[in-house]
Amino acid sequence: MNEQPTPAVEDRMETLRREILKWNRKINLVSRVDTETRLDALLEECELAWRLMRARYGNAPWFLEGQYVDLGSGAGLPGLVWAAAREHDGHRGAVFLVEPRGKRAWFLQRTTRQMALQRVTVVQERWGARTLPDPWTTSQSVFFSLKALKLSDGEILKALTSPERPGEEPAVVVIVRFLSTGTGSELEDRSDQRTLADDTVSPYRMIDRDYADSGRLRLDLVRYQSQPGSLMNDPR
């Protein structure tokens, strides 16, 4: 049997846009005021964010090979946009879209199929409620995106830890936040929502913090590495 050709990224983006517009009134995925214009701006922002990530971190192992988790995925912005871009760029790591609300999780599952995406798992839970399912890989590096969800670094990292196994390599965890398209106090207020893990008690230590900035969009990236006595959760 011949395999179906992989859809182009542009076709997948059009599918995502169509599905959001189709289900928005029933599920409330994006604003109902001037919906098409606002949605197009959100899609453009997510695509710009991926281009910033690729330009700045395109050779980093965690970016190329690590797992990707979108927390509070909602309408799949940026989760489904980045999943499509990752597949197009040849990234091998699994993708997890974490969304606790049932209707939105259903939408993500449906749209994943409509977009013909591979290696995407929708997790209908609050982050930390349970371990992630297969194909989650222990000790593999992972990066998270948060576009609107307010979780501290400590809350994100806490859900990953369990006793370390001998011989495991340290895992890198990167937390990516969309700060703001605004400036001044709005940017500072959103930055203040983050609480960095305390190295004296956390099984992760902070390696560095970086920014990717286009002038219209700013991404905040904090990178951690697991320390002895910790490892990402193994669901088996």
Image (tube, helix red, strand yellow):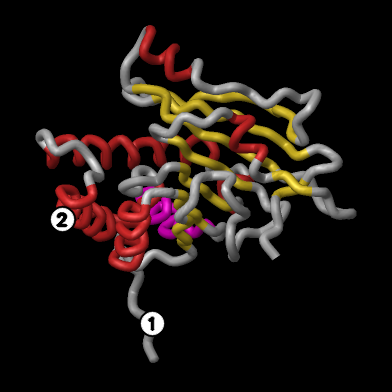
Residue positioned most to the left: 34
Of 104 and 10, nearer the camera is: 104
Q: Residue under circle 1?
A: 3
- Per the image, label 1 sits on a secondary structure element best described as loop
Q: Residue at x 36, y 26 (%)?
A: 217
Task: Indicate the amino acid at tag 1.
Answer: Glu
Q: Is residue 222 above or below residue 192?
A: below
Count numbered badges in the picture.
2
Q: Residue at x 31, y 64 (%)?
A: 110
Dividing the picture into quadrants, the one containing residue 166 is bottom right
Dividing the picture into quadrants, the one containing residue 102 is bottom left
Residue 209 as seen in the image, left or right of residue 85? right
Q: Position of residue 170 (x, y in %)?
A: 78, 44
C-alpha separation, residue under disc 2 versus residue under disc 1? 29 Å
Which part of the image, by quadrant, shows the C terminus?
Answer: bottom right
- Per the image, label 2 sits on a secondary structure element best described as helix
Q: Residue at x 50, y 46 (%)?
A: 126
| Numbered range of the magenta stretch | 81-91
Residue 10 as seen in the image, left or right of residue 232? left
Q: Residue under circle 2?
A: 22
